[in-house]
Image (spheres, rainbow, N blue to C red):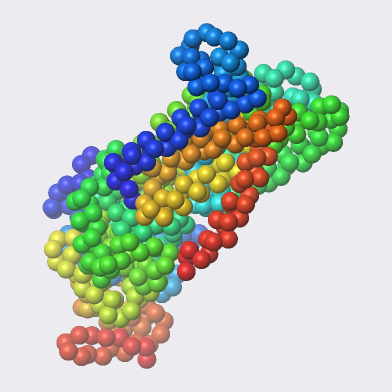
């Protein structure tokens, strides 16, 4: 099992006739979905439509109800258990919606946690790892925070720290559950810019987003979950439309254009 | 987090502390003993009464104290990671309650010391299986369910202990109370406990970084490649066994398992080393061992010739320390 070097032609994430459900409620059925290197996907849908559940399934945190799901050619959920897990963590990274800190810890330690799958059992973090962690902090505008106590950070700072931890992990597939939670506007833009650059450089992004304007601006593909088994996947330009979004959110949306970008506001 | 070199230096210093506490325990007592006697005794030589007291009484008792302190502190540190709660202790899931029921039932029946220990261990083991079985019944174990099950089992054991105490004959009560408070006077041989402590450390240290991740939440740990379920099961079983061995050796000594990991963590955070289990686990074991040796030395000398149960001393010292830590914790976060 060589998960650390997936063949370039292999999709990073592939769902075939996938069925996912939670608490007796089905989220999607017969989902055929393929995420390749360089892709950037937005997942849109109403509250409870199953965006996070689908992402958690792809992250190996819960089993699917049916169909096939593979990451870099390795079948889930088996590849997310046992000895292959560390190799999997070098390919696939997951940003959770909630960050918890039961124990006191500094910002630097928290970022270095992301290096775990790259370290051997008896290894300690090397200068290289610290360097990677420091530049990850720098990418999310947390320079000078290294020695700060995590429990003293603001919500937005804590969220950016979680993003930095994910960057230090250096996966090829980024699964992002609401990466913009708690972020102010300028940091929302900066974080999405940074992830878009990662996708251009050959990584793949899958992000649960709430703003269709951000999805249209930063993602090349979109997956809409209607919450009733129905789904729609395709290039952003085709999928993110006034008509689809109005149906998706159950509320009329208007499309506005400015500077060559499309924005969607509630009607 | 500390570098590996710093961590080894700290551990070397703590080994020094452990050796110092053990030597102090050998020298202190109603029978004056010279340093020469200590070295004579340790090198296995034969000598006068002093050498015999050291070899036959003080050394086994000091080593048993060290082992129990180390076991309790290590188990406490593991429980704190498992329950993601810095205020958890080895007894929170009912292990000591089960052991107490076993030990007191054996005392009530007038059984020999070996059977008291055997039943104490059996009781601890039964409580562990009961809590694990109930909390893990449908294979979905959550922290709150584990904690609730443990607390309820502990409460049930407490009721049985109270029942035994109330029907026990007068002359048996003193022994039972000493057992409940924790007392090293009955420690038979230190070697089983020391061996279990060494094995426990050897088993956990390779997984220390996984434990660091687990302390930051199951989701994060899983996403970073930690096999959550087996690691958690392993911690639970190991921490329970460590506790059971400690309790079997010396009764339910309080506060070491709660305060020592907490103190070590606090010191590490002060030094900017965070909550790194790679250092915290062995450091807590060494500090816990040393502290219990010192506390037991105090317990048998402070009002000599009468001996106090060491659990009373650890509680008397532990309560103010713990309240102090608890009182200043909210300020730390602001």
Nearer-the-camera pick, A118 or A1: A118
Examine the rendering and report whether any part of residue B178 can be seen: yes
Q: What residue appears at the point 61 percent right and 33 percent down from the top-left corner? A: B296
Q: How many labels does the image show?
A: 0
The quarter of the image holding the N terminus of chain A is top left
From the viewer's perspective, tell me whether residue B107 is left or right of residue B295. right
Q: What residue appears at the point 33 percent right and 73 percent down from the top-left corner? A: A180
Q: Position of residue A6 (x, y in %)?
A: 17, 48
The quarter of the image holding the C terminus of chain A is bottom left
Nearer-the-camera pick, A211 or B203: B203
Examine the rendering and report whether any part of residue B179 can be seen: no
Q: Is residue B25 above or below residue A197?
A: above
Q: Position of residue B306 (x, y in %)?
A: 73, 29
Quadrant of the rendered image containing residue A160: bottom left
Q: What residue appears at the point 43 percent right and 57 percent down from the top-left corner? A: A104
Q: Position of residue B129 (x, y in %)?
A: 60, 35
Quadrant of the rendered image containing residue B325: bottom right
From the viewer's perspective, tell me whether residue B259 is left or right of residue B234. right
Q: Where is residue A263 in the image (x, y as percent from the top left)?
A: 27, 86
Q: In this view, does A10 lie above or below B133?
A: below
Q: What residue appears at the point 36 percent right and 83 percent down from the top-left corner? A: A246
From the viewer's perspective, tell me whether residue A199 is left or right of residue A71. left
């Amino acid at each position: 099992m060589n998960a650390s070097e997936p063949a370039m032609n292999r999709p990073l994430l592939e769902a075939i006739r996938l069925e996912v459900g939670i608490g007796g409620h089905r989220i999607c059925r017969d989902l055929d979905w393929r995420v390749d290197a360089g892709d950037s996907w937005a997942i849109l849908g109403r509250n409870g439509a199953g965006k996070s559940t689908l992402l958690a399934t792809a992250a190996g945190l819960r089993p699917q109800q049916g169909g096939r799901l593979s990451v870099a050619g390795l079948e889930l959920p088996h590849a997310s258990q046992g000895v292959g897990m560390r190799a999997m963590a070098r390919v696939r990274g997951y940003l959770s919606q909630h960050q918890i800190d039961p124990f006191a810890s500094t910002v630097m330690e928290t970022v270095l946690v992301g290096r775990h799958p790259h370290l051997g059992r008896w290894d300690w973090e090397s200068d290289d790892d610290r360097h990677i962690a420091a530049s990850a902090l720098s990418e999310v505008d947390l320079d000078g925070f290294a020695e700060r106590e995590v429990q003293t950070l603001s919500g937005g700072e804590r969220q950016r720290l979680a993003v930095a931890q994910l960057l230090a992990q250096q996966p090829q597939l980024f699964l992002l559950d609401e990466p913009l939670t708690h972020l102010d506007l300028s940091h929302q833009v900066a974080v999405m810019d940074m992830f878009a650059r990662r996708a251009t450089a050959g990584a793949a992004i899958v992000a649960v987003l709430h703003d269709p304007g951000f999805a249209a601006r930063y993602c090349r593909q979109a997956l809409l979950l209607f919450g009733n088994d129905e789904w729609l996947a395709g290039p952003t330009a085709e999928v993110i439309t006034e008509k689809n979004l109005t149906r998706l959110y159950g509320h009329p949306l208007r499309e506005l254009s400015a500077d060559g970008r499309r924005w969607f506001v509630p009607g | 987090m500390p570098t590996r070199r710093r961590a080894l230096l700290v551990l070397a210093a703590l080994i020094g502390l452990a050796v110092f506490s053990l030597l102090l325990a050998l020298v202190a007592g109603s029978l004056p003993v010279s340093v020469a006697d200590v070295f004579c005794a340790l090198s296995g030589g034969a000598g006068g009464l002093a050498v015999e007291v050291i070899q036959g009484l003080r050394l086994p008792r000091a080593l048993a104290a060290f082992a129990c302190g180390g076991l309790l502190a290590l188990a406490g540190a593991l429980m704190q990671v498992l329950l993601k709660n810095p205020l958890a202790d080895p007894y929170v899931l009912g292990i000591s309650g089960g052991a107490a029921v076993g030990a007191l039932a054996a005392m009530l029946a007038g059984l020999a010391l070996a059977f008291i220990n055997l039943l104490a261990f059996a009781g601890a083991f039964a409580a562990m299986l009961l809590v694990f079985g109930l909390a893990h019944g449908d294979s979905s174990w959550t922290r709150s369910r584990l904690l609730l099950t443990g607390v309820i089992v502990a409460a049930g054991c407490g009721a049985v202990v109270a029942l035994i105490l109330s029907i026990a004959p007068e002359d048996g009560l003193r022994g039972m109370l000493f057992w409940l408070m924790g007392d090293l006077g009955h420690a038979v041989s230190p070697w089983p406990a020391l061996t279990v402590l060494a094995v426990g450390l050897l088993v956990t240290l390779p997984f220390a970084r996984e434990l660091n991740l687990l302390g930051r939440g199951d989701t994060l740990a899983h996403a970073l490649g930690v096999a959550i379920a087996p690691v958690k099961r392993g911690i639970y079983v190991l921490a329970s066994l460590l506790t059971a061995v400690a309790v079997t050796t010396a009764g339910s000594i309080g506060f070491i398992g709660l305060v020592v990991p907490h103190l070590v963590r606090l010191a590490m955070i002060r030094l900017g080393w965070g909550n790194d289990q790679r250092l915290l686990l062995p450091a807590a074991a060494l500090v816990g061992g040393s502290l219990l040796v010192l506390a037991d030395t105090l317990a048998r000398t402070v009002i000599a010739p009468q001996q106090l149960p060491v659990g009373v001393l650890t509680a008397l010292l532990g309560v103010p320390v713990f309240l102090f830590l608890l009182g200043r914790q909210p300020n730390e976060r602001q």
